[in-house]
Amino acid sequence: MDIKKRSSFHLTSKIIFILLFIAHCKTFPNIVDEKQVHTYIVHVQPHKENEFLGDEEREAWHKSFLPNTTLDSGEQRLVYSYREVISGFAARLTRKEVEDMKSMEGVMHAQQDQELSPRTTYTPSFIGLSQWHGLWVDSFMGQGMIIGVIDSGITPGHSSFKDSTVDKPMPPPPKKWKGKCQFRKQGYCNNKLIGAISFQNGRSPAPRDQKTNGHGTHCAGIAAGSMVPDADVRGLAKGTASGVAPRAHLAIYQSCTTTSCSSTDVLKAMDQAIDDGVDVLSISLGPSLGQRQDPYYVDSMAIGAFSAIRKGLVVSLPAGNSGPEFSSIENDEPWAMTVGASSHDRRAKATVKLGDGTEIVGETGYQDNNFNATLPLVFPSVLGQNGTEGCKKDSFDNVDVKGKIVICYIYGGTYIDMGVNVKNAGGAAMIITDTFREGSTTFSDVHVLPTAHVDDPGLKKIIRYLRSDPNPNATITFGGTTFGARPSPTIAYFSSRGPSLLNGGILKPDIVGPGVNVLSAWPKKPGPGSKAPPGSYFNFQSGTSMATPHLAGVAALLKSTHKNWSPAAIKSAIMTTADRLDRDLKPITDDYNGTRDVANLIALGAGQVNPQAANDPGLVYDIKPFNYIQYLCGIGYSDANVSTVAGRQIQCANLVKINAEDLNYPSISVTLDPKAKKSITRQLTNVVDGGTEVYHAVVEDPKGINVDVSPNTLRFSRLDQKRKFTIEFEVTGMPLSQGETTQGQLLWISPKHEVRSPILVTFS
């Protein structure tokens, strides 16, 4: 073999070896990872004197599980010592050290830290809140309640977080409050913003929201921002900005950087919030894009949420922004309230007029009334035009976009990114088009150049025009803020859908709320040319992240008017009074694919939140925290796994297990064998303090299913009285194929109340 051939052989051999080694390491990650230090959350059995341990004693006990207290670098191993959310701690360890630790007495489970991702002038009014009557008046706008927001921090000094609501000063926080403020500047924390603390891998910097993000500021403003007159986004949507619970107190727990969050930090934030005395937790976070959702015993947010509801807190979590994909739902544990996103009827109008006279109405947060030119149209990569799709940085090679209106649809990146790329390439304006996937959901993003965002039917009109005219052109006109768009509300395409793959079939999301083009506080000027003074910036944002604090605010209002209600009772009241009809009294539709078909329950849940109705639900489906432990045993978790979630030793053999279908949930979801009947049990609790009230069952049968309710009449004569009933399901017609679903509803109706539960049947 000559030298040239031998060198080639050795090079090829090395490449093959490297590829095999990489593949081997992917299959056996311990080989490359065993000595690398990571942060782990370690669950341990509670100390026999747990309730009497002080913070220093608890830390010392947790350190006793570690191989030593510091790393070779001198860095402390112990990151956090948890008190409320779990029995355990977070520490810097190698994989081998974790494996060795598992043999120690008292260690139950250890999991590596995970990355999480962050996921209104008008929306309180849109969901029925009024300054003059109803729930806002009854609850004093949430006065006395504390909403804890775990997110990317807050913008202190913003007008939404001042010490008054228009003309009324905020009262001091309740005496139970134990939290701290890490802002040193006087006035940043006050009777509105009563606490602000940061958790960043064991460090505690000032919890200021970064101007490159703003997610935490926006979510806090939605939940409980004070009323701010004359708010707007670049002159659009002018009015009085308000959070859903504008007189509730805010406690901020920063656990995220500009792009991501650590599960270790989030768990510590939840731990601190519970100890501080918050009433409601709003956490607009979920698994990072591409990550699968883990079982509850390794899901830090699920474990923390369970600890929170045990202490009486309501926990509001986002369904996720991975819709319209099937089974993309996140945060689906039954003890939390999982929130999907809907639209409202306000629009920041922009109209595209094509050269043939066709007009397409869209939206934009960038309105340039001086832009009225008719310009050539270009659509990179489409219909034989040069360039590549998505309006990315390199999409304009071999295509001239200078001085033209550029048509784009999303293909990676963000809508804002596309505008920046178009402007840098010399484009004069942009038309963003939805595709089949985005359907009819359009956004009022604040762009860097004149833009109109149009829906999928609009894209089809544009394509037809481009095919008919060799020299296409168009203009964009801007119509300011309009109201009364129809249909409204609708389900946003991005709102994650069920069914859950983890929770045994419980219907999720639970509820939907405004999550499209929501106006709220923002840390910096939105877009070019804004004239708003510092401290009064607002912006439009969309996502289930925005819907989540809406429901947290509603929960705070209900907790204010019904101080003895459990978290499950509050969630039940919200779900059983939700609207399944839109403003025109037609079934709520889905934006996905642009056809506006009726929304399926796996997208809609119980329906659109109706706060006023939730304040007087008549009956609730209540659940005690111990019932969730029975449920976890019922879906097949081991004793060790259930103990990890519960934070104490559990032996399922000693408990009465509950199937997921028999958990006393406000929605009803069953899997049915076409050849067999199935019965489930529910229990209702009367929450009306008055005379006798009689309810009759009314069933809208799912297609092909007969639903029999027994008894079909329930009589209640005193507060907190409970009544059980059974629901029997039987296939009556031609069964659907395995895995297909059919849906209906159960209503308990009295002269004063209507208690509605959606029914989802899946064929096995």
Image (spheres, rainbow, N blue to C red):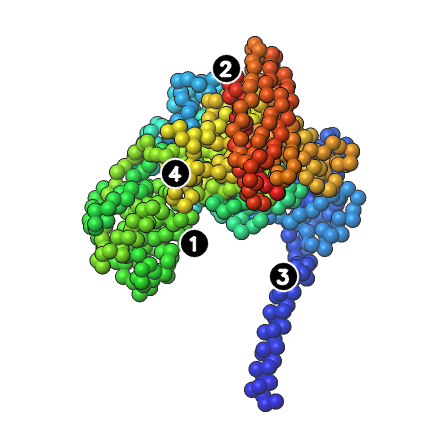
User: Which three-letter amino acid code belongs to the residue tagged 3?
Assistant: Lys
Residue receiving disc 3? 26
Q: Nearer the viewer, mark 2 or mark 1?
A: 2
Q: Which residue is mark 4?
A: 517
**In which quarter of the view is residue 175 placed?**
top right
Q: Is residue 407 left or right of residue 669?
A: left
Q: Amino acid at mark 4?
A: Asn
> Which of labels 2 and 4 is toward the front?
2
Residue 282, image x and y in percent? 53, 34
Q: Give whichever of 182, 452 is nearer the camera.
A: 452
Q: Which residue is mark 1?
A: 412
Which residue is depicted at the point 79% across and 44% down?
Answer: 105
- Mark 3 is surrounded, within 10 Å at the Cα level, by few (under 14), some (14 to 19) or many (20 or more) other residues, namely few
Quarter placement of the N terminus: bottom right
| Count of numbered badges drawn on the protein | 4
Circle 1: is it few (<14), some (14-19), or many (20+) Cα within 10 Å? few
Front residue of this view, candidates 509 and 171: 509
Residue identifier under label 2 = 751
The residue furthest front is: 733
